[in-house]
Image (cartoon, coloured by chain):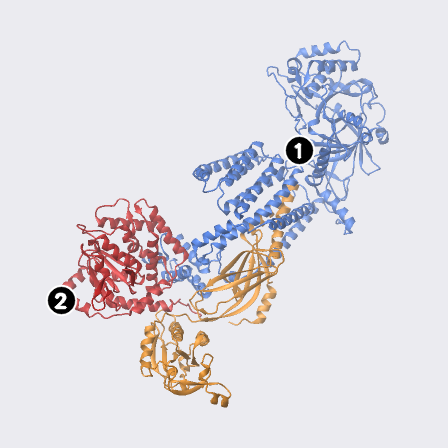
Amino acid sequence: MIVNPLRSRLRRWFRPPRRFRLTREGKWFIGATLILGFAAVNGGINLLFLIFGMLLCLLLANGFLSEASLRHLVVTRRLPAAIHARTPFLVGIAVRNAKKRIPTFSLEVEDMVAEKPVDRRCFYLKVPAGREQETAYRRTLPRRGIHHLSGLRVSTRFPFGLLRRSMDVDAPAELLVYPALLPVTDAVLASGLAELNDRQSTTRTRRGEFESLREFRPGDDPRDIHWRTSARRGRRFVRQFEGNTGRLVVVALDDAQPKEASPGGDRAAPFEAAVSLAASAALVLLRQGYQVGLATSGAFLAPGAGNIQASHILRHLALVEMRPAAEMVPAMLPAALRGIAVLRVLQGPQAPRLETSRALAGRPS
Amino acid sequence: MGAMTRLVPAERERTAAELVQRLERNIAQVIRGKPAAIRHAVLALLARGHLLIEDVPGVGKTTLARALALSMGGTFHRIQFTSDLLPSDILGVSVLEPASGQFVFRKGPLFANVVLADEINRTTPRTQSALLEAMNDSQVSLDGYTYRLEPPFMVVATQNSEEHYGTYPLPESQMDRFTLRMRIDYPSAEDEKGLILEAPAVTEDALARLQPALLLSEIISLQDAAARVRISPELAGYIVDVARETRRSPFLALGLSPRGELAWRNVARASALVAGRDYVLPDDLKQLALPALAHRLVLANQLDSTGRVREEAERVVKDVLNRLPVPG
Amino acid sequence: MKFRLIHKLTSYLLAGTALATLASSQTASWLSVAVLAAAAILSWFVEPDTRLGRLLDRAVPLLNLATVGLFALAVLQVVRSFPEVDLSPFLDFVLFLLGYKLCQRRGNRDYLQIYILSFLVMLAAAWQATSAVFIVGFFLYVLLATWTLILFHLRREIEENYLVRHTGDASGARVTVTRVLNSRRVVGGPFFLYTGLVATLVFGGAALVFASIPRVGLGFILGGVRRQTGVAGFSDEVKLGMHGVLSLDNQTVILRAQVPRIAALRSDDARDSTIASLYWRGTVYDTYENGEWIRSRDEKTRTHLSLYHSPSNDGRTYVLSSPQAPGPPPGRTAAISGAVEQDMEVVALTHAVVFALDQPVAVEMPPPPPGAFTAVDVEARWSGELGLRVFRVSPFDRNDRRTVMPEFAGARYRAYSRASRLGTDGPEGQLLPEALSPYLRAARSLSPRVRELAVRLTAVQPSAAAKVDAVVKWLRATHRYTTDLKRDASIPDPLEDFLFHQSAGHCEYFASAAAMLLRMGGVPTRYVNGFLGGEWNGLRQSITVRDNRAHSWVEAYLGSSGWVRVDATPAVSRAAHMTRLRQVLDAVEMFWSRWVIEYSASQQLLLARQLSREFGWLQPHFSPRGTHHRASRTQVLAVAAGAVALVVVLALRKLPRRRAVRSGLRRGWRGEPPVFHVYQRALDRLAARGFARRPEETPHEYLARARKQGVASADALARLTECYAEARYGDIEVPSEVVLQLRAEAASIGRDS
């Protein structure tokens, strides 16, 4: 959903960034003013003209004061670190009043998606001059993926509530929404992976037998760097120990388009469920100290650990799309990872399920 | 997404719903034809609460409790409450071990995952209060030491509704500690016939052969999931309104307490979780209102027979629900 | 101060200001104003949770009944007053409602109603106000209205936004609202200062609008006659015993006169004493019958005028003459040479009369200002009385005066008078006896003893002057002056009652008595209503005559002296000198009445001309001759309609065309999700078909019942209920395309296919 920049510019030309709209009270007010004007002109009573003038000037004052209120405001958005689908998250909106003396009253800020406001309003009763105030709104997004926010709409009905004046601020943002998380009990994972780990050495020490070399990844212990190879190749390489191998897992996601629809009638549901399960399982494993990689039919993410790896995996899973069955490309795993544990996430009509197996190099498992 | 997109319930809750279904199916193997009773038991478990079964004898209270314990792979103890039962008989006692010369605490039957407190109204108030305190705190304090009751911990207490000769019926404040009060009631005619035709050994055998359907850790994660179910402020207001209404009712001497409100909310959350939702619907609240609330209310004119009291209290609750508008 | 308290205070001050302005404009009865003021003060202490508040709560049904009853009564009274519609019962009703609402302040809606009611009170005050005090009230009202409306808006926003659903915690929200309303930091001194400045600008703007909106005259749009603003006690009828003339409290200014001869006097005492004896002649009557003086409209009594052109200002001069007097009527120069000049300004009266010092000889009317729509002219009445008439004038031909306008908005003119005193040569020479016969008619309602008395008093006197003297002396000796009249109802004629039974009366009685007695003694007399004396205003070098100086006297024909003024009333001294403060106030009042109350199109054009002269703008020019004045009215209407259309187009252009409106997804005014609206509409549709959701039913229970009942398209309702429940209880956003689909389906819910 990339908005055509030209179109948005044209749109902004025809619709000025500052606009006003009469509120319900404002309509009544104008009606009363017109009736009064009629009565004054018809009846020839001079003092009624004075009152008519007062009503007219109050309306104008509303327009001017609301305009003055909206000037010199700096509005920024503060996004949370991670957003998961179907999980509420808080978006902070900070308003700074850059005026020197005049405070801004009764301000409302709404976030906008494609020039349409989202129905969460942040309200600021009074932002004193030169100060900043921040408040947050809570939102839950139903789907994973990229979510665009186009801007912020700042509006006020100050001072009399007869007009609503609003101003659109350009504040484009892209929210990357990670898949919804499911509670994956450790039991499920532990039972499956424990089998695989049985065959590995049970030594608890870090240093087992030296097995292979792989490229240095942030988070690796620098003491493991194999300097000779690194000097030769020009990049850093670390020694891969058996113990480390034992704690390697690749989460393989079955991203084929589901053949039959789920009972709910939604074709994509099993796939989404599988994606969520994959994300949840990966996070749990990472937390447990595994080094987790990700494999889908189109891509492969080498195992790693830490928050950065988590965000890589989540990012990938946020953006992964179903692949039509005909295009199914078998996942290729690099030779170096032969023999590591693979946690397959399979789609199912009712619910996704997990399967553990061992990776055979060059072939999908 | 051009076509009509049916909103898919949240994935994690669907998994929870299936887990619960597995549990219930397992229990149903030995309790026939009582899905509501099984459901109530499971809800009380997920709400981290305790169950009170007020019923006639011989309808399968023990079977239900034992089946529940077995189905979740937990331990089960049955305590038969008699009038001479002491607190130490249920909590445990410290004995002197001659070999080491130390006092060792031997845990009483209360230390189990599911404890059936049978005929709780037969024992002295002292023993009752020992039990109830342990239920409340989830721990036992003796001789300066505190012993935790391992979660999941649930007490299924039974009380014979008709009998009251030589009994110490639970006072209202203690009734409040039970999340739900339910009856199992007599089975349907067919089920009864089936029961009789079956050889008795089959039933006991079935119970003995019952395998766990879930792990204890899964139960705990289900309990956590239930606690995370969201309830909207409107419904919270509705709970409060109902409580206030009961306190105002002329038929009641004592209305719903805040503890009762929380229990109601917890069990509604569990119900939402079981239905596969991550938010509470007013239907969850309304459907569980009778089991969750009726036993906490004290009638203004207490009649002698316990049975009539129960109907009366339920009637008051129904009346309050019919009068109050549901938000939304 | 707490925010809540400040808001309450300003609201009360607003209502109080409106009330005070109403009281100053003397529109409503003192009683209702006083009662309302008391109720308002009491209501300050009535809060919903106090004992008084609870007491009032219990009285609410009764008060509601009273409201309905009073409204019906008001409607009845207004209907009964047709065709002269008198809206004052409505005003009383509004006052009652205001008092009621002040006692029943609960939420924002009640405050809003209080503001609307006080606005109506202010309107009523503007409708009738004539004094300059209104401007003070108006300024205060603008100031307080600005403050109050802003505070009201803030309060509304606080309550609306802190109770919005997604702040999460309902009980917490209520606490927050209370905390904010009790906060002292929301508004402070600088806030009121700045908004006070804004209010002043609004006031100035209002004045500007007032000055610039074209005045197109009465009934321009709908055609209708406004009630005359005349509140003067001076009336056209004289009925003895009716307090038509005398209201000593009536401070309304009737006329202002600049008399150069008096202004030239140096000594204060001389001036004061001269002013005290100034008789301003107004209406004249010749026939008395049964307590009432009327004009017989006998041709013999008609005033004769000769019209001359005034060279100095291009106006018209009317010279009074009498056809019976020998010789040709005097020319203009002859008539006015040596006469006392008075520049008169008469305010709006119910009865438009030329006032001039006793005895007027000529009246000069200035021409109407160029482009003016109306002009005032003199018309001849009876017995030397001159009336004023208002004509609609064509702007192109000032001599084209055709239509008479009913409203009299005051006039300015120059009068010339010669004093009439005993012994001087009056302007009228010998009149023939036929001309005097109307003035000798005696009343039939008087019994013979009156004539006996008259004969007794006058028979012995040698001359008419002596007769006059004797009658006046007798009257002054036997009766004293009072305004507190007593009446013996057994005597049909009040004059006879006065003469024989009462020992006191006011000037009407003295004058009537003198007139009748002299007539019966053979001296022709006529009865004059006017004003006596005045107040000197040193600031403006003018004499101000107020309504409380209304006076009656007699003119007696004394042969060669002509008509001579006779004042039979015992002298009552009145202060003739205004204090400095009084002078300033008087000057202000004069300015106010001329430039605000009587602001008219002619003044606008005058102002426009002055401004255009200053700024060199284009002078307003008129379309070429030949257009009827009716056409000009159509032109103005067309221009006005064009202006209104322009404003409307401008306003519409600025309205944003929001996509949401186009796609039909309306949001609730509190920002609720659109699916709520769709659900609610579906429920309304079902309810209209007789299947309404009960308040204690949950959405799913309702759905189940609908299914059982066999409601059509229950599946669509099921989908809608699911989405609605998810959004409402689960706070989960429903994608807009889904909502659109639901909306399309919802149309079929409940409809029997």
Q: Which three-letter amino acid code belongs to the residue tagged 2?
A: Ala
Identify the chain drawn in blue.
C
Q: Nearer the viewer, residue A258 or A221?
A: A221
Quadrant where the C terminus of chain A lies? bottom left
**Residue C222 visible in the picture:** no
Q: Nearer the viewer, residue C696 or B150?
A: B150
To the question of a shared chain for discs 1 and 2, the answer is no
Question: Where is residue A299 shown, x and y percent of the image?
Answer: 44, 81
| The hue in which chain B appears in the rendered picture of the protein | red
Q: Tag 1, which secondary structure?
A: loop
Question: Where is residue B170 shown, x and y percent of the image?
Answer: 24, 52
Q: Nearer the viewer, residue C276 or A239?
A: A239
* Residue for badge 2: B199
**Residue C552 visible in the picture:** yes
Q: Which three-letter amino acid code belongs to the residue tagged 1?
A: Gly
Chain for mark 2?
B
Residue placed farthest to the front in the image?
Answer: B101
Residue C230 shows which numbered tag?
A: 1
The answer to whether the residues at label 1 and label 2 have Cβ atoms under 8 Å apart is no
Question: Where is residue B248 shown, x and y percent of the image?
Answer: 34, 46
Chain for mark 1?
C
Quadrant hosting residue C118: top right
Identify the chain drawn in orange.
A
